[in-house]
Image (spheres, helix red, strand yellow):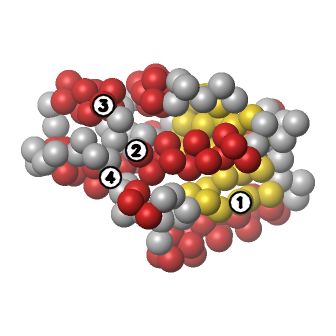
């Protein structure tokens, strides 16, 4: 059984994230969406809220689990017997940073592979920070996020 971990802050989870998870769920026996606490990023939603939103958005995927984490990613992967770390690449500009992460993770855990997935083209430009910014300025973000996420953003009164 191959387990893959898809880590991120998911603040909030977008349709691009969901697209990657849905495709990963076909490729792997088990996918863990690892929601990073990331207090240094000063997330809009608490880790508990982000886990709840991801759980609601991805509820239809039987082999997908949502879990918070605040440890080294490779330690989290090891604790869950994951041999694959999934990372999303929206554009070439993402690659350098992701390449560095993959390199250090390989040094720390040589038995864990990092695989990159690209979201579908219609989601390639979406980021959580852009969704927050557009929503905060009163723009319509409904095509970028699940309705539950849109409702949560409205409750936050951005």
Q: Is residue 33 left or right of residue 29?
A: left
Element under disc 3? helix
Q: Disc 4 vs disc 1: which is toward the camera?
A: 1
Labelled pair 1, 3 in contact (Cβ < 8 Å): no
Residue sitting at x 65%, y 70%:
100
Q: Disc 4 vs disc 2: which is toward the camera?
A: 2
CA–CA distance in space, label 1 to label 3: 29 Å
Residue 50: horizontal and vertical position, in percent? 44, 30
Residue 158: horizontal and vertical position, in percent? 16, 37
CA–CA distance in space, label 4 to label 2: 10 Å
- Specify few, some or many for label 1: CA neighbours under 10 Å numbering under 14, 14-19, or 20 or more: few
Element under disc 4? helix
Q: Which residue is mark 1?
A: 115
How many numbered discs? 4
Residue 73 visible, this angle:
no
Q: Which residue is mark 2?
A: 14
N-terminal of the pair, mark 2 or mark 3, is 2
- Specify few, some or many for label 2: CA neighbours under 10 Å numbering under 14, 14-19, or 20 or more: many
Q: Which residue is mark 4?
A: 129
Seen in the picture, residue 32 relative to 105 is either above or below; the reply is above
Identify the mark at residue 147; answer none if there is no mark: 3
């Amino acid at each position: 059984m191959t387990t893959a971990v898809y880590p991120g802050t998911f603040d909030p989870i977008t349709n691009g994230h969901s697209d990657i998870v849905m495709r990963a769920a076909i490729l792997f026996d088990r996918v863990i969406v690892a929601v990073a606490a990331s207090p240094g990023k000063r997330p809009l939603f608490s880790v508990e809220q982000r886990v709840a939103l991801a759980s609601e958005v991805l509820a239809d995927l039987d082999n997908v689990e949502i879990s918070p984490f605040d440890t080294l990613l490779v330690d989290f992967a090891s604790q869950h017997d994951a041999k694959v770390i999934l990372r999303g690449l929206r554009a070439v500009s993402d690659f350098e940073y992701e390449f560095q992460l993959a390199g250090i993770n390989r040094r720390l855990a040589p038995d864990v592979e990092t695989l990159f997935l690209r979201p579908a083209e219609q989601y390639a430009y979406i980021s959580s920070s852009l969704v927050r910014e557009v929503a905060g300025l009163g723009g319509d973000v409904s095509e970028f996020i699940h309705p539950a996420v849109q409702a949560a953003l409205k409750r936050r009164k951005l």
